[in-house]
Image (spheres, grey):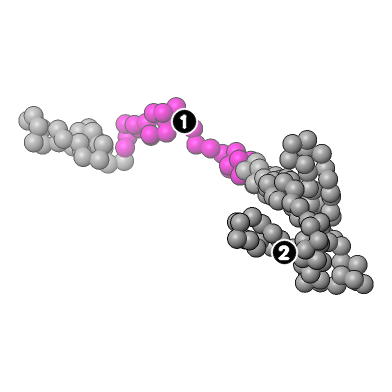
Amino acid sequence: MFGSSPFSYAPGGLSPDDFSPRRSFHNDDQRDSPMQRNNMSRPTGKSIYMQRKEYSETLNKQSDGLSVRVEHLFTCDMDGQDVNSINDCVAKLKRLDTKGRVWSQEMILELQGGYLVLSDIETKVELDTLALNNIIETNAIWTLAPTTQCSH
């Protein structure tokens, strides 16, 4: 191919010395492994464990720190008297809307520990805090009016 040696072309990154007949079968010359040539050492079991532990802790912190921008309309307490279900809450919201008493407010919805926190988007002041174990059900209502504005 190239030159007088049949192995002057090195497919796959192999050098001509890799095919040398003088090279012993049991690798007596102890060539450096690719990791040793790059001054890298093999990671220990403990270092792998610690790396995975740190990664999982990072994931857990991220999943606990949900933060979403929302347009909040209404928080409804199910008191068991006037309001027993999500449908009752939606009906109450619609009644308030027909009277012009509903407006949306942009907020940041966050999960902090075991709480759902609604904060003002500009001042970051907490407007409402609800324990997650007290939240029975949630519902997103999105009805577009002909003017393409959210009416409920």
Residue displayed at 23% across by 33% down:
15
Q: Earlier in the sequence, mark 1 or mark 2?
A: 1
Image location of residue 45, percent across then percent down: 58, 42
Q: Amino acid at mark 1?
A: Met
Towards the viewer: 27 or 48: 48
* Distance of label 1 from label 2 (alpha carbons): 54 Å
Image location of residue 77, percent across then percent down: 87, 62
Please name which of the two marks, 1 or 2, marks the residue nearer to the observer. 2
Towards the viewer: 92 or 40: 92
Which quadrant of the figure has residue 26? top left
- Residue 73 lies left or right of residue 134; in this view the side is left
Q: Is residue 35 magenta?
A: yes
- Mark 2 crowd level (few <14, some 14–19, many ≥20, 10 Å Cα): few
User: In the picture shown, does residue 130 fall above or below 58?
Assistant: below
- Residue 81 lies left or right of residue 104; in this view the side is right
Answer whether residue 21 is visible to the viewer in this image. Answer: yes
Residue displayed at 71% across by 61% down:
152
Towards the viewer: 114 or 25: 114
- Mark 1 crowd level (few <14, some 14–19, many ≥20, 10 Å Cα): few
Q: Is residue 11 magenta?
A: no
- Residue 44 lies left or right of residue 37; in this view the side is right
Residue named by callout 2: 139
Region in magenta: 27-52
Q: Secondary structure at mark 2?
A: loop
Q: Secondary structure at mark 1?
A: loop
- Residue 4 lies left or right of residue 111; in this view the side is left
Residue displayed at 78% across by 48% down:
118
Image location of residue 28, percent across then percent down: 32, 34
Which quadrant of the figure has residue 65? top right
Q: Quadrant of the N terminus?
A: top left
For residue 40, which numbered disc appears in the image? 1
